[in-house]
Image: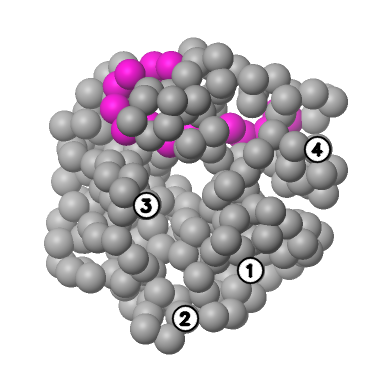
């Protein structure tokens, strides 16, 4: 029996988290401020969500819009506070001014996480050289997924890149799971699954009322059902 695909849903608060879990989500990405494409939530928000659901939670470590690391000391302190509150999984990713991975910033933060699992997020879709970024991050402790649309413009544009990267799974730099998100629609799923993609990330697709409205249990359930189709 093949293992079921991972469904990760963006949650802004407890209501979202409860609905996503009830709909069949495997994991939540916890963020705030979607106008800035998702920043670090408060420790209190994390604690309330952790108390409300029992699925995996990945906490965004990003303090400002854009892909620069910014205040490294503040990032480290934020990560430390989240870990002290019980966070065990994270999402992060930083680029330098040239579009290369900001390896010193990533390595410092990963050191603070001390082996926790983490996703490198869609900064990869803004990188000057995706392959070089993957090779530079290869072997960093805890890195187990890349969240990517294959393109900064979204999955429609990035599908060829996603399929090509899925075909390289297992090569150096390509061991982490490919988790597809960013303009992902249900009609993309069969082709991605056929290529071996086994993790999917939704935000707006789980919110029929838009970002001002909550996650819909029914919308998440529809995704769960499609992902579970053989």
Viewer-nearest of discs 2 and 3: 3
Residue named by callout 3: 37
**Front one among 178 and 82:** 178
Q: Position of residue 38 (x, y in %)?
A: 34, 48
Instruction: Reply yes or no: does residue 4 show up in magenta.
Output: yes
Question: As drawn, is 40 to the left or to the right of 28?
Answer: left
Give the position of the C terminus as an image quadrant: top right
Query: Closer to the N terminus: mark 3 or mark 1?
Result: 3
Tell me which corner region of the image, top left, top right, bottom left or bottom right, holds residue 111. Answer: bottom left
Task: Kindly indicate whether the residue at mark 3 contacts the one at mark 2 (C-beta within 8 angstroms).
Answer: no
Query: Closer to the N terminus: mark 4 or mark 3?
Result: 3
**SS for callout 1:** loop
* Residue extent of the magenta highlight: 3-20
Q: Which mark is residue 173?
A: 1
Q: Residue at x 48, y 52 (%)?
A: 119
Disc 1: CA contacts within 10 A as few (<14), some (14-19) or many (>=20): some
């Amino acid at each position: 029996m093949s293992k079921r695909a991972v469904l990760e849903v963006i949650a802004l608060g407890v209501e979202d988290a409860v609905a996503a879990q009830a709909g069949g989500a495997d994991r939540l990405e916890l963020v705030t401020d979607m106008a800035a494409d998702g920043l670090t939530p408060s420790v209190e928000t994390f604690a309330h969500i952790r108390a409300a659901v029992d699925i995996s939670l990945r906490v965004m470590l990003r303090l400002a819009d854009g892909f620069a690391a910014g205040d490294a000391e503040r990032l480290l302190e934020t990560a430390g506070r989240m870990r002290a509150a019980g966070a065990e999984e994270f999402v992060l990713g930083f680029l330098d001014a040239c579009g290369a991975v900001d390896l010193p910033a990533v390595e410092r933060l990963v050191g603070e996480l001390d082996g926790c699992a983490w996703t490198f997020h869609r900064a990869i879709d803004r990188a000057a050289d995706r392959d070089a970024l993957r090779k530079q991050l290869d072997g960093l402790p805890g890195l187990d997924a890349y969240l990517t649309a294959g393109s900064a413009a979204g999955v429609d544009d990035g599908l060829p890149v996603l399929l090509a990267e899925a075909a390289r799974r297992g090569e150096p730099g390509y061991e982490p799971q490919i988790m597809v998100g960013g303009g992902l629609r249900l009609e993309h799923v069969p082709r991605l699954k056929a290529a071996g993609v086994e993790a999917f990330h939704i935000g707006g697709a789980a919110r029929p009322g838009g970002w001002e409205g909550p996650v819909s249990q029914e919308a998440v359930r529809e995704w769960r059902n499609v992902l579970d189709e053989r």
